[in-house]
Amino acid sequence: MTYFIAVFILILLCCVFLYNNLISKKNKTEEAYSSIDIMLKKRTDLIPQLVNTVKGAIQHERETLTELTQLREKLLEQHIQLKERFELESQLGMMLGKIQVRAEAYPDLKANQNFLLLQSSLNEVEEQLSAARRAYNAAVNSFNNAIEMFPSNLMGKMMGYSQRTLFTIKEEEKKVPNISFN
């Protein structure tokens, strides 16, 4: 009889460990996603300042600035799907890079302290965002492994967990951008 009680307690402890481990991994993915949100908020707060600073120096870039503003507004929408959000975020990052490279051709803008400060701030945010994406992918990978591997996959199924989406970029975003100053 004590043998059955010991086996039951061992099984119960294993279930508690698996349950707690999965909860911990799920919370870690949510925390990592929240870190991306924080960096995106910081970046979207900087964009209007950058746009206003750049507007005066490069009037003919209005189309790019308008597109940048529209992307920012889409990212601020509350009911955006995760995959669409990642795509918009990637587009925004590419556009910010293009704006910064184009701005290098304007001596007045390069000498503008506000622009230099904003450019530095955006570079810092982009680095932090990149780190947050890596942390998110690591957390998602750990979570996905846990819900696929035995025996935690059994507990994961009982809890209704499914795989999370990794942050990835499109093939065209991997190419070196072609930037012209003509």
Image (cartoon, helix red, strand yellow):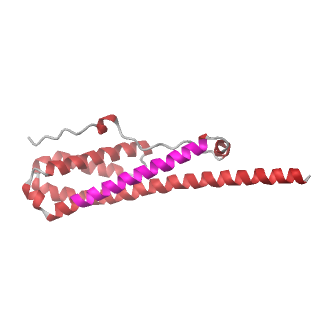
| Left or right, residue 37 beside residue 177 | right
| Left or right, residue 47 beside residue 154 | left
| Residue in the foreground of this view, choosing between 78 and 110 | 110
Magenta-colored stretch includes residue 138: yes
| Point 15% across, 55% down: residue | 54
Q: Main secondary structure of the magenta part?
A: helix
| Left or right, residue 96 beside residue 77 | left
Say whether residue 81 is visible.
Answer: no
Tell which residue pokes out farthest to the right in this image: 1
Q: Position of residue 17 (x, y in %)?
A: 68, 54
Q: Position of residue 42 (x, y in %)?
A: 33, 60
| Point 11% across, 57% down: residue | 109
Magenta-colored stretch includes residue 154: no
Label total for image = 0
Q: Position of residue 29 (x, y in %)?
A: 51, 52
Residue stretch rendered in magenta on the structure: 119-147
